Image (cartoon, rainbow, N blue to C red):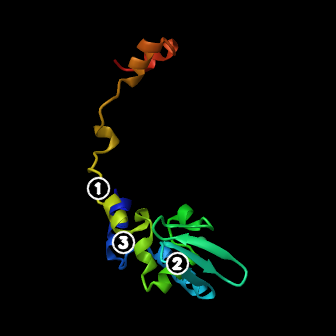
Amino acid sequence: MARIEEERETKEKRKGLVCPRVDELLKRRSKRSEEYIARSNGSPRYEVSSPNHNFIVNIEKKSCACGLWQLGGVPCVHAVCVYRALNKDPRKFVHEALLKTTFLEVYNHTLEPLNGPTMWTKAHILIFFHRISGCFRGDQKDVEE
Ligand SMILES: [Zn+2]
């Protein structure tokens, strides 16, 4: 209960669209994307090339030939290169599971306060199990009815 409250407070204080790890990852990829050139033929598919490699990025399907974007939900260096060419923020194209709003939604639900174990009612699951299965007949004397 305390951990969930702590996580929610921490996430609420953070600024930005995505969590800090994703933000840092995108900054590194943005720097590396300067080594690539993105070319378009007018479709959502782009050819992103460096002197040694070519990758096809489809911004409509949020996919790249390298497969990193599909696997991790964060635009890869090739996709970041395309968004840089389009003058768009790649943070807006991160999978929704990695957005701050999703984290806040997950930690929005609270656990109800709970009394200590001395206040708990005894469960009769073992008795039910004994009657159904006929197993552990020797242990029945340990179970309260
Ligand atoms: Zn890629």
| Chain-order first, disc 2 or disc 1 | 2
Q: Picture quarter containing residue 110? A: bottom left
Q: Which of the pair 23/61 is nearer the observer?
A: 61
As drawn, 50 above or below 121: below
Q: Contact (CB < 8 A) between labels 3 and 2?
A: no
Horizontal and vertical percent for residue 40?
53, 79
Q: Which of the pair 63/107 is nearer the observer?
A: 63
- Distance from Cα at disc 3 to Cα at disc 2: 44 Å
Amino acid marked by disc 1: His
Q: Picture quarter containing residue 54? A: bottom right
- Which residue lies at the image location 33% right of the left edge and 29% below the top edge? 122
| Residue 23 visible in the snapshot | yes
Residue carrying label 3: 10
Viewer-nearest of discs 3 and 2: 2
Ligand 1 lies under 8 Å from the Cβ of mark 2 = no
Q: Contact (CB < 8 A) between labels 2 and 1?
A: no
| Residue 107 visible in the snapshot | no
Horizontal and vertical percent for residue 51?
71, 84
Disc number at residue 119? Answer: none
| Chain-order first, disc 1 or disc 3 | 3
Amino acid marked by disc 2: Asn
As drawn, 56 above or below 138: below
Q: Which of the pair 78/39 is nearer the observer?
A: 39
- Which residue lies at the image location 54% right of the left edge and 84% below the top edge? 30
- Which residue lies at the image location 56% right of the left edge and 61% below the top edge? 71
Residue carrying label 2: 41
Residue carrying label 1: 109
Q: Contact (CB < 8 A) between labels 1 and 3?
A: no
